[in-house]
Amino acid sequence: MSFQEELKKLTEKIKQYRDEARVQIHLAREDVKDEWDDLEQEWDRFRAKMEDIFHDAENASQETRQAAERLGKTLKDNYEELRNKLK
């Protein structure tokens, strides 16, 4: 699987977790809503980085790719944790 395919797959998984959490967020306590707001800011930063990398993927350094992948995995984990809190 290519790097771009891996990032697209990761992005789709994050989007899925994000969408599931959004559906349930109206039932959440205020502290969970604050966590949601923080994650949304991280989501916006992640999307901006992904756009930059996809736009210029061939010239992106290995360090940039790894940083984006780490950010994406952390963000995915955080959305998953929030989603689990809402169950």
Image (cartoon, rainbow, N blue to C red):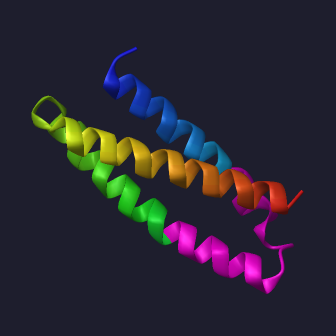
Q: Position of residue 49 (x, y in %)?
A: 29, 53
Residue 63 x/y as whole percent: 22, 42
Looking at the image, can residue 60 be seen? yes
Quadrant containing the N terminus is top left
Q: Nearer the viewer, residue 57 or 69?
A: 69
For this view, does 23 lie left or right of residue 67?
A: right
Q: Which residues are magenta?
A: 19-40
- Give above or below for 60 relative to 34: above
Can you say whether 6 is above or below 70 in the image? Answer: above
Measuring from the top left, give residue 2's x and y in whole percent. 34, 18
- Residue drawn where x is 42% and y is 27% of the image: 6
Residue 29 or residue 27, whichever sits in front: 29
Point out residue 81 in the picture as x, y percentages from the top left corner. 72, 56
In the orientation shown, which residue stands out farthest toward the bottom? 30
Q: Main secondary structure of the magenta part?
A: helix
Q: Residue at x 59, y 76 (%)?
A: 37
Residue 39, by quadrant, is bottom right
Q: State yes or no: residue 20 in magenta.
A: yes
Q: Nearer the viewer, residue 7 or 24?
A: 7
85 left or right, relative to 11: right
Report how many numbered discs are placed on residues in the image: 0
User: Is 10 on the left-hand or right-hand side of 25?
Assistant: left
Residue 18 shows in the view: no
Say which quadrant the C terminus sits in.
Answer: bottom right
Above or below for 66 versus 37: above
